[in-house]
Amino acid sequence: AKQPPRAAWSLERLIHEHSILLGHALDNSTFRAYSSHLNSYLTFCELHHMPIEPTPDTLSYFVTFMSHHIQPRSVEAYLSGIVSQLEPHFPEVRKSRHSLLVRRTMRGALHSLGRPVNRRLPLLRDDLLRVYNDLTHPLTHDDLLWVAQLHCGFFGLLRLGELVVPDDPSLTDFTKITQRTSVKVSSSNFAFLVQRDKTDTRGATSLAVAGMSPESICAVGRWTSGTWEQYVRKNPTLLQALLFHGRP
């Protein structure tokens, strides 16, 4: 097919634009967390007089040590941060992370040192009504804002980061913040544009309890059928809600 004409860029511009894209590969909050994970790894190596090269042996020992101090599930997240931060310097780190030795050590830590996940009950519509009734009336401006946030987050399946602005200005990402100009109000509803969303899948349980069909929940949550089916299999609470509160 015929390509539209495009002007060539200078090498300096290519390098500049390339650097900008690399700088946006991770959110500031994610980059800060990954840096903390790397610091834990470097401290471990220094404490035990080991080279920092992330070999399968070193990563396996790191998993063993850290799993006795924090939950093994968190150690898995630490490994992701270590791989992300060290890969430019040690290209084999991802291979080491997924080596049989590290995977078996991680599995053993999860089985012997892990604790069951303590899941909170899903927020339901009755809880929204209870919050409104328990507040002192007439509602203050701050109370009205909080109730509005609570309802927007509930019905929009939004996460906390999509409802508030971080206290730390360095973590503010304006590509995630909903613009006031995107709000559309009608006589029966209102809508707004979420710039970048990470839909809260836990809200699916509340929609299922309310009687919404699986197809509608998928549409609201913008999930693919495969992702939805996998999530249902892993969450018995959601499956129970679909069976007992869904369509007849």
Image: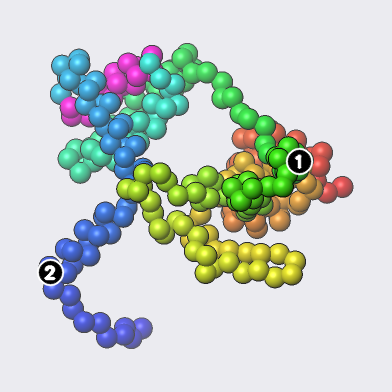
SS for callout 1: helix
The label nearer to you, 1 versus 2, is: 1
Q: Residue 14 in the image: x percent, y percent?
A: 18, 67
The residue under label 1 is 133
Residue 94 visible: no
Q: Check disc 2 and give the amino acid type.
A: Leu
Residue found 15% across the figure and 16% down from its top? 49
Is 229 situated left or right of 63 in this image?
right
Pointer 1 or 2: first along the chain: 2
SS for callout 2: helix
The residue under label 2 is 11
Residue found 26% across the figure and 54% down from its top? 23
Q: Which residues are magenta?
A: 52-68
Secondary structure mainly formed by the magenta segment: helix
Residue 146 visible: yes
Q: Is residue 26 above or below residue 20?
A: above
Most foreground residue, 161 or 135: 135
Q: Check disc 1 and give the amino acid type.
A: Asn
Q: Which mark is residue 46?
A: none
Is 86 inside the magenta-drawn segment? no
Is 114 situated left or right of 91 in this image?
right
Q: Is residue 44 above or below residue 81?
A: above
Q: Residue 89 in the image: x percent, y percent?
A: 17, 40
